[in-house]
Image (tube, rainbow, N blue to C red):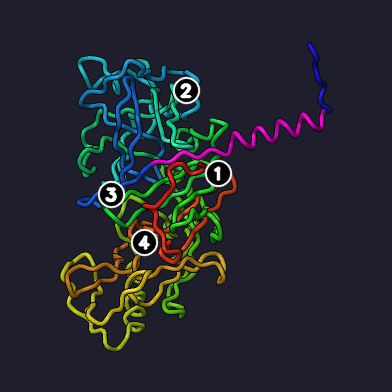
């Protein structure tokens, strides 16, 4: 037998290349917009035997959690035992026995540990989310299914936490950036997948968008295959330490708002997080359908937007209480980036770094001849000043680079004559 000895430098190069190639895969989670609740819903395979489960996407969620109240059947379910490595890794805060059921079941076992479980749709939290392991399967490249036999998640038996979830949904897909058992952080333990993910939400309720997990590239068709992670505007990911649960949420710095190229007069002290109490600032959320603005900012934005509308576009009485500024759409021209209305810029950490919101994301057609500004005014005294919601995120790519603590924004993919529903589910193929 002949053996070859490689120089150390060549061996290191080979190992680095191997790591790079192994890290180049991308997972993809299809995301559907529910027509009745406007929630963004993804689907994974779980348990033994493997079954599809639907989960509402929550950017600031600590874990993948599922409802175990009405029968969780799996031969591979394994609760985390008190003082185990799993409990320590998940940063469990408590340990105990089943006290809510007469019989033991998934979600209620003896000598198991817990983390907090949350439903962002109703702002409800419980402190007894049982940490467990089971099989998980997600689509990967090139068109394959990747399976993890011991994926950590939380199992809940509190029916209150199921309130307001869309029909058929049995839990939450948590993408928090701090929790070790959030979906992106846990999947990154597999050397094939980088600690990055990108979200591309479809504006359609009939065509699916996608969450890519891994280092990219992230391809869609227009009709050629295009990497939509090119030419993003990046800004710093800010951690809000107001509370241990809120530290999972994604905050960014918005320093000003421009409409039709002109600065909106704002109380800019509201735009930064108050370091004493953690309120104010700007958060990105998939749990609300439309961006919420502090009332004083909302009033200023409405005033500036109306002023920038063409003179032949009259205001109309809002047909719904949800929106405060509505107008006739009879004289509004349609373009490839939506209704031809004034562009709104969220200026980030410097004037040249901004995320532009075009008509497709800034307004909504509420009736045949009426459009409304798709923002909601709300008393945000003890909340973020701005909470960017789903409608504004649709047909945009947001790239979350967790190791570098930064978030990249594309503008509307309609500018490139493509959409989030045209993603390539073979990605590298």
Above or below, 16 relative to 382:
above
Give left or right: position of 327 versus 185. Answer: left
> Which residue lies at the image location 71% right of the left edge and 30% below the top edge?
15
Closer to viewer: mark 2 or mark 3: 3
Q: Earlier in the sequence, mark 2 or mark 4?
A: 2
To which residue does mark 4 refer? Answer: 392
Task: State the image coordinates of residue 193 (x, y, percent, origin top left).
Answer: 54, 36
Q: Quadrant of the N terminus?
A: top right
Of the numbered discs 2 and 3, the one sitting upstream in the chain is: 3
Cα separation between marks 3 and 4: 14 Å
Give the camera-side residue of 406 and 246: 406
282 lies above or below 301: above
> What residue occupies the far bottom of the structure in this picture?
311
**Residue where numbered disc 2 is placed:** 86
Question: How far apart are labels 4 and 1 at the CA level?
Answer: 24 Å
First-in-chain label (1 vs 2): 2
The magenta-colored residue range is 8-29
Question: Mainly helix, strand or loop, the magenta region?
Answer: helix
Disc number for residue 167: none
Residue at mark 1: 215
Whether label 2 touches label 3, CB < 8 Å: no
Q: Earlier in the sequence, mark 3 or mark 1?
A: 3
Residue 320 in percent (x, y) is at 17, 67
SS for tag 4?
helix
Q: Inspect the magenta stretch and tell me whether residue 391 lies in it.
A: no
* Pair 3/1: label in front: 1
Select label 2 or label 4 by which is in front: 4
How dense is the environment of label 2, judged by Cα within 10 Å: few (below 14), some, or many (20 and up)? some
Q: For marks 2 and 3, give the CA distance.
A: 31 Å
């Amino acid at each position: 037998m002949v053996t070859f000895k490689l120089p150390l430098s060549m061996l290191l190069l080979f190992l680095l290349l191997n790591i790079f190639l192994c890290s180049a895969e991308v997972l993809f989670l299809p995301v559907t917009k529910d027509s009745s609740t406007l929630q963004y819903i993804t689907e994974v395979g779980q348990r033994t035997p493997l079954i599809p489960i639907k989960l509402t996407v929550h950017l600031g969620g600590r874990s993948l959690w599922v409802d175990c109240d009405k029968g969780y059947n799996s031969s591979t379910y394994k609760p985390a035992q008190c003082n185990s490595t799993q409990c320590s890794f998940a940063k469990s805060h408590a340990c105990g026995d089943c006290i809510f059921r007469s019989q033991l079941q998934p979600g209620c076992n003896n000598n198991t540990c817990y983390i907090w479980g949350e439903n962002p749709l109703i702002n409800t939290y419980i402190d007894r989310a049982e940490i467990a392991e089971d099989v998980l399967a997600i689509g990967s490249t090139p068109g394959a299914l990747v399976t993890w036999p011991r994926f950590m998640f939380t199992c809940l038996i509190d029916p209150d936490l199921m309130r307001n979830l869309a029909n058929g949904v049995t839990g939450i897909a948590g993408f928090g950036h701090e929790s070790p058992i959030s979906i992106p952080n846990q999947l990154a333990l597999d050397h094939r997948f980088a600690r990055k993910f990108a979200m591309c939400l479809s504006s359609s309720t009939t065509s699916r968008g996608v969450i890519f997990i891994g280092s990219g590239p992230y391809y869609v068709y227009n009709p050629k295959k295009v990497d939509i992670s090119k030419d993003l505007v990046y800004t710093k990911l800010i951690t809000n330490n107001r509370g241990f649960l809120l530290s999972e949420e994604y905050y960014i710095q918005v320093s000003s708002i421009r409409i039709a190229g002109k600065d909106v007069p704002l109380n800019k002290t509201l735009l930064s997080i108050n370091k004493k109490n953690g309120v104010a600032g700007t958060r990105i959320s998939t749990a609300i359908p439309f961006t919420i603005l502090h009332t004083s900012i909302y009033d200023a934005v409405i005033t500036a937007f109306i002023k920038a509308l063409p003179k032949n576009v009259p205001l109309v009485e809002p047909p719904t209480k949800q929106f405060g500024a509505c107008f006739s759409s009879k004289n509004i021209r349609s373009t490839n980036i939506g209704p031809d209305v004034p562009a709104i810029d969220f200026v980030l950490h410097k004037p040249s770094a901004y995320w532009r919101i075009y008509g497709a994301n800034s307004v909504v057609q509420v009736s045949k001849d009426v459009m409304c500004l798709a923002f909601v005014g709300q008393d945000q005294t003890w909340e973020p000043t701005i909470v960017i919601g789903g409608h504004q995120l649709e047909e945009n790519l947001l790239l979350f680079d967790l190791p570098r603590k930064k978030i990249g924004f594309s503008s509307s993919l309609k500018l490139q004559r493509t959409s989030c529903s045209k993603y390539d589910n073979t990605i590298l193929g």
